[in-house]
Image (cartoon, rainbow, N blue to C red):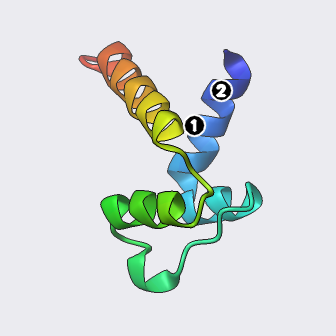
């Protein structure tokens, strides 16, 4: 779990660099649009719908854990 938290922290610091380090380069023209990034990654086969759903679920769990802190 600590590795996942570390990865999340790295992602928060620089999402584009984190994605590139995972082999998921994203065009600069969509760099500020999370929905477009997700769609691009799915369209290029770098992200599945299941992976997207899992990431969204984890993000919601993180939000719930850190609310009120």
Left/right of residue 43 with respect to residue 30 in the rendered view: right
Mark 1–mark 2 Cα distance, whole angstroms, equals 6 Å
Q: Which residue is mark 2?
A: 4
Q: Residue at the spot x=65%, y=26% of the render?
A: 4
How would you rate the neighbour count of disc 1 (Cα within 10 Å): few for under 14, some for 14-19, many for 20 or more? some
Q: Which residue is mark 1?
A: 8
Q: Residue at the spot x=27%, y=19% of the render?
A: 67
Q: Give the SS element for disc 2.
A: helix
Quadrant where the N terminus is found in the figure: top right
Q: Position of residue 32 (x, y in %)?
A: 36, 71
Left/right of residue 53 with respect to residue 69 in the rendered view: right
Q: Give the SS element for disc 1.
A: helix
Left/right of residue 3 with respect to residue 58 in the rendered view: right
Q: Quarter-wise, where is residue 37 in the image?
A: bottom left
Q: Position of residue 51 (x, y in %)?
A: 53, 37
Q: Quarter-wise, where is residue 62 in the image?
A: top left
Q: Residue at the spot x=73%, y=25% of the render?
A: 3
Q: Residue at the spot x=57%, y=48% of the render?
A: 11
Q: Relative to 28, is 37 above or below? A: above
In depth, the one of 62 and 23 nearer the eye is 23
Q: Which mark is residue 33?
A: none
In depth, the one of 9 and 47 nearer the eye is 47
């Amino acid at each position: 779990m600590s590795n996942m938290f570390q990865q999340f922290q790295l992602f928060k610091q620089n999402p584009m660099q984190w994605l590139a380090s995972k082999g998921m380069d994203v065009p600069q023209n969509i760099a500020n649009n999370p929905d477009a990034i997700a769609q691009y990654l799915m369209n290029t086969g770098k992200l599945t719908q299941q992976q997207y759903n899992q990431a969204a679920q984890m993000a919601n769990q993180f939000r719930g854990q850190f609310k009120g802190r």
